[in-house]
Amino acid sequence: MHPSNPLLAALHLASPALPVGGFAYSQGLEQAVEDRWVTNMEQAYIWIRDVLCLSLARQELPLWLACHRACRSGDWQTLRASNQSLFSLRETAEFRLESIQMGHSMAKLFKQWPHGQTLVELTDIEWVYPAAHAALSAVSGIEESMALTAYLWSWVENQAIAAVKIIPLGQIDGQTLLHRLKADIDHAMTIASDIHPDDIGSGAIGLAITSARHESQYSRLFRS
C-alpha cells in the first residue's frame, strides 16, 4: 500500500497524458461562453471558482473522500454505495456520460497499477470517474490529501485550458487563472473535509441548466 514515491504516483494520476479523455469536456463552460456569461479572464475565474467551491466541494468531493477511505479500509460496500451516489447526483445526460466514460477509461488502467488488481476484481461496479480516481489513489498508497490535491489540480487545469481555447484567452491569462485558483483548491478541500457524505448537497441550478443547454448547442468543441 506504500509506493516508493507517492508524489510520482499522484502526478501520474493528475497528468493530462492519462488516457481518460478529460480534455474532451468543458463541464458546461463552453455553453457559458456561448451565452456570454463568461467573456474574459475575470469571469472565467469566477465561474471556475464557484463550480469548484459551491458544487464540487459540497457534493462530489466528500464522496471522493468516502471512496478513498473505503478503499483504504477494505470497505467495498461503502465504495459501491459512494460510486452509485456520485452517478445518481449527475444532473444532466452530458454530466452522466462524462463521468461514466472517464470512469470506464480509468478502470481500464487498474491492471497496470501496483495493487490495482484489487479493483479489477470488483466486477459489479460501473465506475464513475471520481470514485475510480479515489480508489486507484487509495490502493496505490497515495495519502488522501495529496491524492485529492492531484485530482483537483487536474480538474482546474482542464477548466483553464478550456477557457483559453473557447473565450479565447492568452497563455499568460491561462497561467494567471491557475495561480489564482490554487488558493481555491485548498479552500475546496477544507470545505469537503468538514462535510459528512450524509450531509452533501449543492444547488448549482445554473450549472445544470447550462450543461443541459449545451447538449443542443449548434457548434461546439467539447462533449460537455
Image (tube, grey):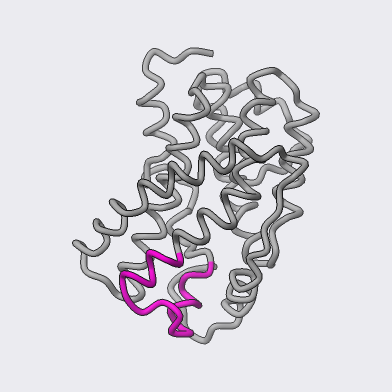
Q: Quadrant of the C terminus?
A: bottom right
Magenta stretch: give its range: 28-47
Task: Say if the magenta span includes residue 31.
Answer: yes
Nearest the camera: 117 or 149? 149
Nearest the camera: 155 or 94? 155
Residue 105 image point, x, y percent: 56, 45
Instruction: Count all numbered tags in the image, as a single digit.
Output: 0
Q: Measuring 30% from the left and 59% from the top, which residue is drawn there?
A: 177
Q: Quadrant of the N terminus?
A: top right
What kind of secondary structure does the magenta stretch mostly adopt?
Answer: helix
Q: Measuring 35% from the left and 60% from the top, which residue is drawn there?
A: 160
Is 103 on the left-hand or right-hand side of 143?
right
Residue 46 image point, x, y percent: 42, 66
The furthest residue to the left = 172
Q: Is residue 139 above or below residue 195?
A: above
Q: Is residue 154 above or below residue 26?
A: above
Residue 142 image point, x, y percent: 48, 23
Residue 54 lies in quadrant: bottom right
Residue 169 image point, x, y percent: 26, 71
Q: Measuring 62% from the left and 53% from the top, which residue is drawn there?
A: 99
Task: Say if the magenta span includes residue 147.
Answer: no
Q: Measuring 51% from the left and 55% from the top, which residue is drawn there?
A: 52
Q: Is residue 138 above or below residue 102?
A: above
Q: Is residue 94 above or below residue 196?
A: below
Residue 130 lies in quadrant: top right
